[in-house]
Amino acid sequence: MKDPVKRTLSALLAAAGMAAVLSGCGAPAAQTDTADAGTQAAAPAAEYGPVLTRIQQTGKLVVGTASGYMPYEFIDIGSSDQKVIGVDMALGDKIAEKLSETLGTEVTTQIEDTTFTSTLAAIAADQIDIMLAGMSPTDERRETMDFSDVYLKAEQRLMVRKEDADQYKTLADFAGKSIAVQKTTTQEKIAQDLLTDSTVTSLEKIPVCVLELTTGKADAVVIESTVAQPYLIANPDLVLCDAAFPDDRLYKDTAIAVPKGNEDFLAVINETIKECQDAGLIDQWITEYSEICAENNKNA
């Protein structure tokens, strides 16, 4: 009798052990399924490039510029806060609005106003998020920074005193004359390349170049037509002369620079540029800020 009893108990214990094993294996499987389902249901976190990530974390779009390049950027001396305003600053605000929509967090602009040369160095070194300074996307600059689509085109011109305008019909007429240009700009490069018989003086700001012209220390300023506009409105003694640069150097494209390797950021910028162009905002801003510049110059 003992053997059958032993065999029965052994069978019962074995069955109980197997159930426990199966039960133990089944519980984790159910947990794994639940975890997998939760993972699949959760929306993946957005991944951005370095600059967009920085903007999302800080809520700031750090804009590098160089005021004194009217109507793109200039200090509004008629305001109480003396802030930097202009076409570029208005465009920067629109980009911040678009970033707020894209990133799902409020983004405001923080203006870093230095010289054009310093701002170029800052964008190349990834020390600022964006460079809005009426700048041209040259091949040399593309080596150290990326550019947006072109948002404005202008002509490169020579501004002179009205009383002298008749003597300047061709570039050759500027032989022996003094030419003022802004340092590290396409205007400086044009003057150095095409006005080789002239004395070219490079200065940090356009207002200083224009002052050299009005005080007789310079005979002309190489300037883009958009920037010349407020000076011509404010000072009837200045004009753009007939002497013209060749077609391959006549037109200037204006674009926005960003640190290299931020294609997602550029996509947001380009979308904003198109929206502003389609709405006629950039032309509107040029007129609006040129008038403010002219008024500031009269009251200065």
Image: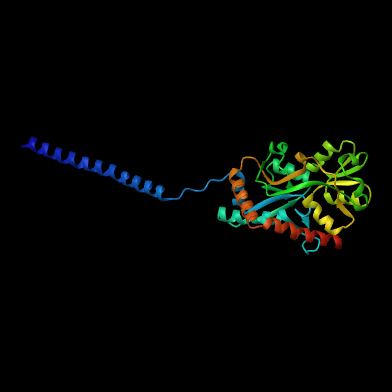
Q: What residue is rendered at 77% in x and 52% in y? A: 226
The answer, for residue 185, to whether it is visible in the render is no
Q: Quadrant of the C terminus?
A: bottom right
Residue 250 on image: x %, y %: 77, 43
* Front-most of residues 26 and 106: 106
The total number of labels drawn is 0
Q: Quick one: 236 or 299, which is closer to the camera? A: 236
x, y percent for residue 48: 56, 46
Residue 12, quarter of picture: top left
At x 82%, y 60%, the residue is: 294
Where residue 202 sits, quadrant-wise, is top right
106 vs 156: above or below: below
Relative to 285, 105 lies left or right:
left
Q: Position of residue 17 (x, y in %)?
A: 21, 40
Q: Quadrant of residue 19?
A: top left
Q: Is residue 105 left or right of residue 134?
A: left
Instruction: Give x and y (percent) for residue 216.
Output: 94, 49
Q: Residue at x 87, y 51 (%)?
A: 210
Assign the N terminus to one quadrant of the image.
top left
Name the residue located 77 percent from the left edge and 62 percent from the top edge.
81
